[in-house]
């Protein structure tokens, strides 16, 4: 699952696109309009570089279920 951009907060500075190691995020320019887009969502490694370095905190990560699973002890986690 790709990062999520809050377009209300995004100032379209392009820093996220510059620091993404896999070029997942792009700035699209159409005429005078600029928009930050997740161009290649399936390529995201969830490194969080975009989330951590966004100057206006307009990006948050949406993790796949496999990334959210916690390690459970065989006895169901009871001590």
Image (cartoon, helix red, strand yellow):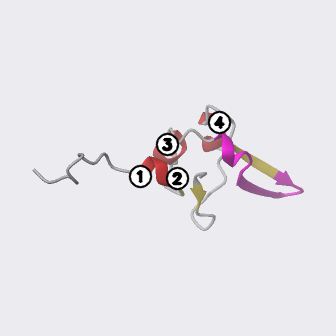
Using the numbered discs, state the Cα–Cα distance from disc 4 to disc 3 in whole angstroms.
Answer: 13 Å
Q: Secondary structure at mark 1?
A: helix
Of labels 1 and 3, earlier in sequence is: 3
> Mark 3 = which residue?
48
> Mark 4 = which residue?
18
Using the numbered discs, state the Cα–Cα distance from disc 1 to disc 3 in whole angstroms.
Answer: 15 Å
The residue located at (14%, 54%) in the rendering is: 78
Q: Secondary structure at mark 3?
A: loop
Q: How many residues crowd around disc 2 within 10 Å: few (fewer than 14), some, or many (20 or more)?
A: few
Instruction: Point out the frontmost of discs 4 and 3.
Output: 3
Which segment is the magenta one?
29-43
Mark 4 near mark 3, Cβ–Cβ under 8 Å? no
Whether residue 69 appears in magenta in the rendering, the answer is no
> Mark 2 = which residue?
64
Q: Secondary structure at mark 4?
A: helix
Mark 1 near mark 2, Cβ–Cβ under 8 Å? yes
């Amino acid at each position: 699952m790709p990062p999520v951009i809050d377009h209300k907060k995004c100032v379209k500075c392009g820093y996220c696109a510059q620091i993404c190691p896999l070029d997942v995020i792009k700035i699209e320019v159409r005429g005078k309009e600029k928009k930050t887009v997740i161009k290649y969502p399936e390529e995201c490694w969830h490194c969080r570089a975009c989330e951590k370095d966004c100057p206006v905190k307009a990006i948050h990560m949406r993790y796949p279920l496999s990334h959210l699973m916690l390690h459970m002890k065989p006895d169901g986690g009871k001590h």
